[in-house]
Structures are given as structure tokens and as C-alpha cells.
Image: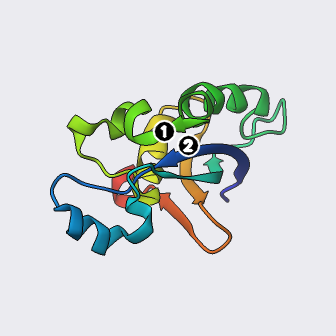
Amino acid sequence: MKVSLTRRYRFAASHRLHTPRLSESENQRVYGKCSNPYGHGHNYSVEVTVSGPIDPATGMIANLAQLDPYVETRILEAFDQKYLNEQVPEFAPEKSLVPTTENLCRVIFQRLKGFPLAHLDRVRIEETSNNSFEIEESLDAAA
């Protein structure tokens, strides 16, 4: 039997979808209005799913009093009210990692992967009411 806990967090950030690997016209063609030189923002909703055995003493997989500060320091403080392209190291210009929500999902998963009290199963990000992205650790990677 597997028991999971999913917790939702929110942050606001801006980004520009643009890569130096493409010309300005190619960036415009690929990313459209999201390639605006001044960027654009989103109110992101992030779901973090962890799993593990239920502690017989507490009846919990993970104590929210421990999960919340872990997410706060690794994600919310790092991403909230930030321009992802310049203020988040993984998206720094020299890294050439475009801050798409797919890549944002990967970065957040990597930052949370070390949570010591439960297994990180999934990160899901809702960018808009029409778009959401998720990453799960594959069974192969967990082995």
C-alpha cells in the first residue's frame, strides 16, 4: 500500500521565453508574445507530492511543520516575486536554460528531491487555468 501527501503552494514570478541559440525572429516565431523583451508574469500554483510509510506514532507520512519550511526556503523564497531569467541561478543567461514551465518544473523537482522525511514523487505546476505541467520520478530512476 502506498500513501501520498500533496501540498499546494503559490508564488508569483516573471520570465521571458527566449534563447540565444535562436535569432530574434526565430524566438518570436517559437515563443510568440512570451518572448517579449520585458518579460511577463504568472501566479503559479505548485503541488508537491510526497509518499512514505505512515509513522505509527504520529499517523503521518510527513509533518507539514517540516515540509512547509523546506519548500519555503528552497522554492518560495527563491522564486516568489523574481525575474526567473536573472534571479534564479538555474536560468542565468550563461546557463542557457529557457525558463519554460517545463524547465521550471524540473528545477523545482531537483531542489526538493533531498527532502529527508518522505520520498518526493511528483511536482505539478499550474501556470494558468489552461496550462499545467508535472514531473514524476520514474520507477527506473528510483531504482
- In the picture, measured across the screen, residue 53 lies left or right of residue 119, that is right
Say which amino acid is labelled 1.
Tyr
Residue 8 visible in the picture: yes
Please tell me whether residue 80 is drawn above or below residue 126 in the rendered image. Answer: above
In the figure, residue 116 lies in which quadrant? Answer: top right
Tell me which label, 2 or 1, sits earlier in the chain: 1
Q: Position of residue 125 (x, y in %)?
A: 58, 57
Q: Locate residue 28 relative to residue 13 in the image: left or right.
A: left
Mark 2 residue element = strand
The front one of 30 and 5 is: 30
**Residue type (three-letter) at the residue carrying disc 2:** His
Q: Please give the name of the residue rendered at 48% of the width and 58% of the height, measured from the top-left corner.
A: 136
- Dots 2, 1 in contact, CB < 8 A: no
Q: Distance from label 2 to label 1 (Cα)?
A: 30 Å
Q: Residues within 10 Å of mark 2 (few under 14, many from 20)?
A: many
Question: On the rendered structure, is 43 left or right of 106?
Answer: right
Q: Is residue 41 above or below residue 117?
A: below
**Residue drawn at point x = 38 percent, y = 71 percent:** 32
Q: Which residue is mark 1?
A: 83
Who's the residue at 63% across and 75% down the image?
130
Question: Residue 119 — which label?
Answer: 2
